[in-house]
Image (tube, coloured by chain):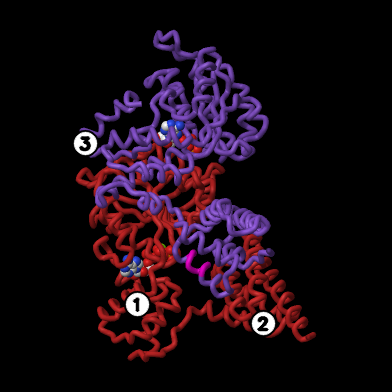
Chain colours: A purple, B red
Amino acid sequence: MDLMLGKNKKSTKDKDDGKIELWVEKYRPKNMDEVSSQEEVVKVLRKTMETKNLPHLLFYGPPGTGKTSTILALARELYGPELMKSRVLELNASDDRGIDVIREKVKNFSRLAVSQNTNGNSSCPPYKIVILDEADSMTNDAQTALRRTMEISSKVTRFCLICNYVSRIIDPLTSRCAKFRFKSLGKESMKSRLEEICKCENIPYTDEALNELINVSEGDMRKSITYLQSASQLSKIEGSLTPNMVFELAGVIPNEIVDQVINVWVKGTSDEKMTMANNIILSGYSVSKLLLQINKRLVENVEFSSKIKCYMVKYLGKAEKALVEGADEKLQLLSLLYSEIHS
Amino acid sequence: MLWVDKYRPNSLEKLDYHENITKQLKALTQLNDFPHIIFYGPPGAGKKTRINCVLKELFGSGVEKMKTIQKEYQTPSGRKIDLNLVVSNYHIELNPGQVTTQDRVIIQNVIKEIAQTQQIDSTAQKRFKVVLLNEADHLSKDAQHALRRTMEKYSANLRLILCCDNTSKIISPIQSRCLLLRISAPEEKDIVNILNQVASKEGIKLPQKFAYTIANKSNRNLRRALLMLETARVQQYPFSEDQNVILPDWEVYIKNLTNMILQEQSPERALQVRGKLYELITHCIPPTLIIKTLAIELAQNVDNQLKGRIFQEAAKYEANLQKGNKAIFHIEAFVIKVMAIYKKYIIDMTKF
Ligand SMILES: Nc1ncnc2c1ncn2[C@@H]1O[C@H](COP(=O)(O)OP(=O)(O)OP(=O)(O)O)[C@@H](O)[C@H]1O
Ligand SMILES: Nc1ncnc2c1ncn2[C@@H]1O[C@H](COP(=O)(O)OP(=O)(O)OP(=O)(O)O)[C@@H](O)[C@H]1O
Ligand SMILES: [Mg+2]
Ligand SMILES: [Mg+2]
């Protein structure tokens, strides 16, 4: 670990070059072995790379688990940092990816492939890579068109589709790809990565604070690094990194408040419910986050019967669904708190 | 100039309340590595004011020299969109509300443009420019997805600041790329404090009881409180302790609607209510706000056992409204449902 982050150390020393850096970028894995916690994926990918016949790839999994980093690292390993620029086409959701645009761009890109020589590098693969990052935000029509494009250009081009939700990619595409699932990062690997960064950046921390940071990040490595960077700035005024700082940064609702909400929901008077809903909204807490936290809290709860909990979970699910579909937070919360729970 | 603008604090030092957040913001602006930030919290909590103070701290007073420029963008289908952008040398402000259906195209273009240009002012304290997205929760999912990789790729030249009421509608990959800063509504005592400051700067006498009444009626919305104070000043001065606080027109209107619904439940009445609803919608009161205010007003005027039903129906019809495209239908359906529930309740009551 120390070795791999070693090269970053230099840039922290000559800090006054005025360069602004986000740690998430600074500590983005530079090669595939630096990708934490996705050993299975990396192992299989390495095997496939050896065969010289890379299939089309599909990476999927939650945010901040290393999908984009892995494909960039793979490309770098295949082509080296220089050749990579001409051999890899990255199209993400910030690019225009209408049907025609994709067809045109990919066509132009792969046409050039054949004519380019490999600079005498014999290990350099004879194909180019098109990365379609955030592919789940492509329309179905665009995806359908892509299917054809993939076929036509597959001699010289490999595609890598990346998404959070594999269900949003149409079947004809997924079935053409080797699929790789990126899982949320385990606590241990997050911790060792964060500890490394703390060391490189000279941040005093407590074990407790790091653990909280990991808890609130829910397996999202990017999130944990983003929080770490902000928290470290705050810790410079307040001494060292503390759990409370982490909570506030992560927008976690304190357990006391979650418990109060649960109590008012089950036993509160009508007035108490109204006041509670008002306070939650005026405090700016996210109701969807609140629902999740109530759910977690209920699992640990021993006071209520499982029947009551069953009702509660059902109502939570209903409100959560409505919120995802864009419903108003306050009305959903009111409706939840006023729902009848039969004991 | 309205008092809300006249007395808007313009530097971190001058911000009242939430001192802790102010301290955090100060710390964040000190160093080179300023994160992408989402400011979230209820209306009138002071998000925008705080953001402006942060920008000034980052770039100095040059950031206040804003101008409006006209831009033309083209959609993939060839349609042209005209857009007025508010820009300074250091930042650019976007209001997605202006362009709802094509916001993705706008976001793609504006952000790439700004991200690819380095800060031209070499004396600038920061190398990056800021793109401020107001009402970020109104951005379409498409537009939000368009931000994801851009935020990473151009992080050397670009920082995003998102401002929104709540984070529920911000997709999680974006949240994962930002620092979340919650700006809760000021407490009533904070509001009273600010009302007093404004009164003293204006040289007017403000009875404390009246100040508290305003703070209370504002529902902890500072902008609303300041507007109420200014309206009251026009209405009647010197103030009396028990002076009435004037509510916004549309709220009074909805209160009347509530009475109409509870007084009589009949097809004729439903028709009259419908006319009033149309009136509200043509005055650009957002449908969600109408149904929410109506539900809360109704609940306050019926027996306890009916409140739950009313909120459940309101929640249901409001959720439907989000999916459909004729808001009035869903509000009307809600009203008719409430009439039915209320009528049945009254009949059942009189049976015994
Ligand atoms: N497995 C990992 N090992 C080490 N660092 C990681 C890992 N996953 C994420 N990170 C950190 O998080 C940052 C973002 O990761 P990456 O862009 O690969 O995520 P992603 O899976 O593509 O997420 P999204 O779905 O949001 O696009 C990286 O720059 C790196 O700092
Ligand atoms: N910290 C503060 N101290 C004193 N006055 C403030 C402060 N913050 C805001 N105000 C006053 O409150 C008014 C409303 O604030 P602001 O416009 O920032 O709210 P907002 O949270 O952006 O609301 P909305 O979401 O409705 O746009 C401002 O015009 C200003 O006069
Ligand atoms: Mg990614
Ligand atoms: Mg505002």
Residue B219, horizontal then vertical, whole percent: 45, 74
> Is A88 located above or below residue A238 in the figure?
above
| Rendering quarter of residue A330 | bottom right
Specify the amino acid type for callout 2: Leu
Q: Nearer the viewer, mark 3 or mark 2?
A: 2
Q: Residues within 10 Å of mark 2 (few under 14, many from 20)?
A: some
Q: Mark 1 points at which residue?
A: B192
Identify the image quadrant of the C terminus of chain B.
bottom right
Residue ID for mark 3: A17
Ligand 2 closer than 8 Å to label 1 CB: no
Q: Is mark 3 within 8 Å of ligand 1?
A: no
What secondary structure is found at the residue carrying circle 1? helix
Give SS at disc 3: helix
Q: In this view, does A149 lie above or below A266?
A: above
Residue holding disc 2: B262
Identify the chain of the residue marked 3, using the numbered disc in the image: A
The type of residue carrying mark 3 is: Asp
Please tell me which residue is depicted at 33% across the width and 60% down the height of the picture. Answer: B50
- Which of the two marks, 2 or 1, is nearer to us in this view? 1
Give the CA separation, mark 2 to mark 1.
Answer: 35 Å
Q: From mark 3 to mark 2, how far is it between C-alphas?
A: 69 Å
| Above-or-below relation of A119 to B202 | above
Question: Which amino acid, by three-letter code, is at mark 1?
Answer: Val
Where residue A204 appears, x then y in whole percent? 27, 42
Name the chain under label 1.
B
Pinpoint the chain carrying mark 2. Answer: B
Which residue reaches farthest right? B351
* Nearer-the-camera pick, A274 or B8: A274
**What are the residue bounds of the magenta stretch?**
A276-281
The question of residue A143 being in magenta is answered with no
